[in-house]
Amino acid sequence: MIIHGKNVDFVIEKGDPSGIVGSDPLNLRKNPKRVLSQLKRTKIKIPYLQECIGGYLNNDVGSFLDYCIKMVTQVFIEELKENPSFITSNNFIVNINLIFQNSTHLGKYFDKLSGLEKALFRVNPIGIIREIVFYGRFNLSEIIYHEFIHHLRNCYGKNAYQWIDKAIDQLAQQEQRDPSKITYLINAQCIIFVLDSVSNEGIAEFAAQYQKRKRIPFEKHIFAEIIFILDLLCTDFGPEVTNKATKILEQSRAAYKIGSLIVATIVLHKLFSNNKKFYAWLKIYGVWFGRRTYNAIEIGKFYNTKLFDLYFTYDDEETDRIVEQTIADIYGMSHLGFLKAYEEACVNLKIKPFFTLQIYDFYKRECWQNYQALKREGRI
């Protein structure tokens, strides 16, 4: 297929949906009329979605699988047509791995198996149907856009923790020890991974919401999940600890929430620096206030109260350009550059930052000191 003058091939790896369709874990076949009625009410526009759900309701595995492939592939094609920058090679391969699980897992991009000439994604159609039928929400194009942002950063951005891998190998050779036993560095790698995940997921989450909804989300979230994970990595060592930390990070979606807020703060600073004014909707304690214009000082006051959600809209192409350029600039930032940009934005907006380089350095030092203490005691 030729898209924007480039050759794009789709490779579909399809799992076997017969077990999950036959057992109907979603219990959709108990009341198919209600399911179809719910689908109409949501007004969700995804190509082949109705046919896909129809195959599921009729326990027709072949039809269900065929329409799942058509549905997912068509949305990928539409995203590539709308966003030519996602095609990172003249001969580009989009590898889509379809899995069928009754879970909240929806999509994933595999950075280590991808590059300029190939992007590997995983998509869970059962999870998509689950979100639509039970919650009346889902934007497949937003999810795919989110994952393609990961692809762009993987190709053109910075990997925050590659140097730790080299450090582990070098130290293991010096001490003639198994690299998996260098527990301080493994935990330090995980601490860097936490921050890189905040940066990586935050950029993708913010960019997808901005592009698909044309708004700047400024949703307030507490940083407790990240602090808990960092505390865990500083006080105990071993693969079970790092596995637990990464699992908490994934399940809580803390990196998405916190990272998106940090990106929104950086973008907001850039916009105010260019004398842009905003129409915004403000929500405090669950109550929405009317649409009005806010300035930087007012935003800072709301930000520091920890009580608000704020949704910005814009009304000119220049704002759009500034936002997209800022997102592109963040692609190339390291995990430390990302935090530095956030702190600078907070200073200029008179906002109290919730995560800083000082906090990050504190956890790295704590990790090292605890490791040295345990080593002296002969426990590691």
Image: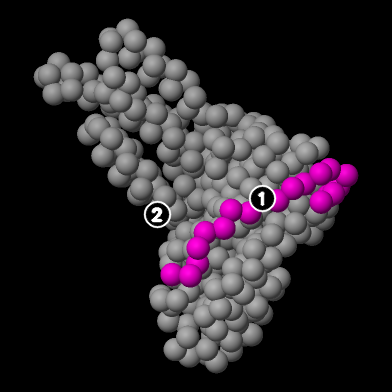
Residue 55 appears in which quarter of the rendering? bottom right
Which percent across, then down, holds residue 269? Answer: 64, 42
Closer to the N terminus: mark 1 or mark 2?
1
Q: Work out how far the residue at label 1 is from the one at label 2, CA to CA, in angstroms.
A: 32 Å
Give the amino acid at mark 2. Answer: Ser
Mark 2: few/some/many CA within 10 Å (<14, 14-19, 20+): few
Do the CB atoms of the residues marked 1 and 2 lie less than 8 Å apart?
A: no
Q: Where is 273 relative to 14, above or below?
A: above
Residue marked by disc 1: 11
Q: Which mark is residue 348?
A: none
Q: Is residue 77 left or right of residue 103?
A: right
- Relative side of 213 to 175, left or right: right
Q: Secondary structure at mark 2?
A: helix
Residue type, numbered disc 1? Val
Identified at 44% across, 35% down, the residue is 193
- Element assignment for label 1: strand
- Residue 370 sits in quarter: top left
- The residue that disc 2 covers is 252
* Quadrant hosting residue 379: top left
Question: Start and end of the magenta stretch?
Answer: 1-19
Q: Residues within 10 Å of mark 1 (few under 14, many from 20)?
A: few
Going by the picture, which residue comes out furthest to the left?
A: 377
- Is residue 128 visible from the viewing direction of this image? yes
**Image spot of residue 23 (x, y percent):** 41, 76
Question: Does 28 sit above or below residue 344?
Answer: below
Quarter of the figure with the C terminus: top left
